[in-house]
Amino acid sequence: MDEFHSPPVVEVADSENLNSLLAARVERMGDQPLVERKDAPDGPWVSMTAREFDAAVVAVAKGLVARGVEPGTAVGIMSRTRYEWTLLDFAVWAAGAVPVPLYETSSAEQVQWILTDADVRLLVVESAAHAATVAETRDGAPALTDVLVIDDGAIELLIDAGTDVGDDEIARRRTLASGDDVATIIYTSGTTGRPKGAELTHANFVHLSRNAVHKLGVVCPPGSRTLLFMPLAHVFARFIEVLIIPAGSVIGHTPDTKALLADLGTFRPTFILSVPRVFEKVYNSSEQKAAAGGKRAIFQRAAKTAIVYSRALDTPKGPSPWLRLQHKVADVLVLSKLRKALGGQAEWAISGGAPLGERLGHFYRGVGLRVLEGYGLTETTAPLTVNLPDATKIGTVGPPLPGLSMKVAPDGELLAKGAGVFRGYHGNPEATEAAFEDGWFRTGDLGSMDDDGFVRITGRKKEIIVTAGGKNVAPAVLEDRLRGHPVVSQVVVVGDQRPYIGALVTLDPEALPGWLSTRGLPEMDVTTASTHPEVRAALDRAVERANKAVSRAESIRRYTVLTTDFTVENDYLTPSMKVKREQVLSDFTAEIDALYSEQGASAES
């Protein structure tokens, strides 16, 4: 199969926009909850109906109008994921303007580029620190006339400013945008080069969200609940922010990921949005917690049972009576506790941003949390494909959502067309032209499709490594498997035009203390651990396990442990937690060269 089309199941009128989505929610479920928010980090969740949220949106939109925001004006939002982010997003749309997200971790240079390229006139930031970053760029962003700070009362300031703006003006502005008009400009994370601004339309969001709600069905029925903790500056969380409107779901926000587990416990979501790294950390931290209590063997047996049980669900006969009994015992001892840690109500999760891996997919399904892995990009308004409640194949990213088509090019690149595909890069016709081929968007990812349209991702086209022997190697398979080890944080596989495959490995400073303790090893920092014999022996075994997924020619022959982890703060990760591969390859040239020298200190596996 090299092409698959999924017809739309919900037709969308050209006049519909994001404002009409919210209006329909208010008309249908106006007095039922839409948002739950906290006024203090340790405070209770306070419910807000759809009608109350809509009134707040109108009040803030009036303030934007009073501040001079005209229809089509770019309004920047620079903040962590919090209630005010979602409020501002819908208020900007209600004012007829175009919200432009900026990551709160952005550097002054990145901020200046986005403000200038998008012609942002008004910017709302979260904190004084963000305002200080913006201040460094003001001379280079002459269009910017207004900067408001959420922590200093920006929302209240806007509401006060808009008291003289009439309801009829907001009502008029809410109808201005058609489906083809730009709803937002989202700048790519930029693993390479300067970020490009993807122009996503109202139709992109409306068509995709309404069709996704129809297909996801039991995942997000009216009254379902989800807690957003992924960055709302990223298209993945942004799409879910919109999806909950037609779904009739309730949304909460967690600005501080350190409070995530506590917030999950009190908010009690029914479905969770996350990236694979979070699922890996939950698994690894659970194993370490069990080990600290002397129950590591019990946890590992329960995890294995969960995986075997899940795999058996995909066989014609299903799990045997004996396996069902083992699974019930594992559930009582371990698995039910994991569900409780996630709030006790979560039955579904949507994973995207990177490959989840078959092992984790089966583990969580065995726990009772069905992870629906999906795939998409900024340029596709997030989901192109997703596994569905009634059609799941673990190890794939599912079939195309309704209204979307996927095709595999002769060189293996995945091409996309349809409702969610963006209209182009802001002010960059050359890049837009290069992104399309005969009307199909070139994703840059490599993959395959089966006869049912289920897509399997095999790697990034630009990241394919060609060894000196001419062997093509997709690094993602090895990286994902090796990164699953509890003490490993990040992995970059190398070997382009080299005699064999190598890897750069970083250790997880948060997981390291617990891992050492459960093995009776003394406390040590990352630098000491990077050369410790028992740590290296554990990594050797992890590399050996990862190599079982590939041929000998594709296997990791040497690796080195770096003492610097890759983080957003040191600019080796994008805000969506993707490694900036070119930056790593450039900055660690000496370490890579050492992998291929006779004196290379890396272990042979």
Image (cartoon, rainbow, N blue to C red):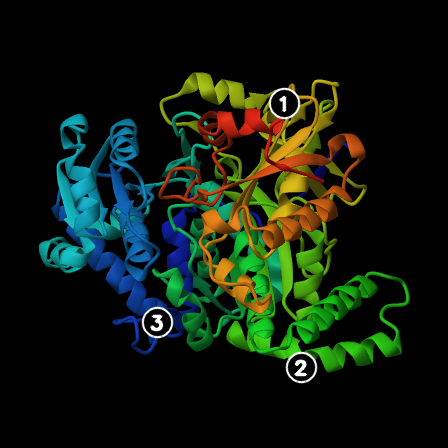
Instruction: Pick the residue in front: 80 or 550.
Output: 550
Residue 270 at least partly seen: yes
Question: Where's residue 329, x and y in %?
Answer: 74, 82
Badge 3 density bin: few <14, some 14–19, many ≥20, Cα 10 Å: some
- Report which quarter residue 365 is drawn in: bottom right
Disc 1, SS: loop
Disc with the residue nearer the chain's start (1 vs 3): 3
Q: Of the residues shown, which amino acid type is indicated by label 2?
A: Leu
* Marks 2/1: CA–CA distance: 47 Å
Question: Where's residue 401, x and y in %?
Answer: 63, 47
Q: Which residue is mark 1?
A: 496
Q: Which residue is mark 3?
A: 49
Q: Of the residues shown, which amino acid type is indicated by label 3?
A: Thr
Question: Where's residue 521, x and y in %?
Answer: 55, 63
Tell me the quarter of the image containing the N terminus: top right
Question: Where's residue 53, x and y in %?
Answer: 31, 65
Q: Is residue 355 above or below residue 592?
A: below
Question: Closer to the camera: disc 3 or disc 2?
Answer: 2
* Marks 3/2: CA–CA distance: 39 Å
Disc with the residue nearer the chain's start (2 vs 1): 2
Residue pushed farthest right?
A: 317
Tell me the quarter of the image containing the C terminus: top right
Instruction: Pick the residue in front: 354 or 26.
Output: 354
* Marks 1/3: CA–CA distance: 55 Å
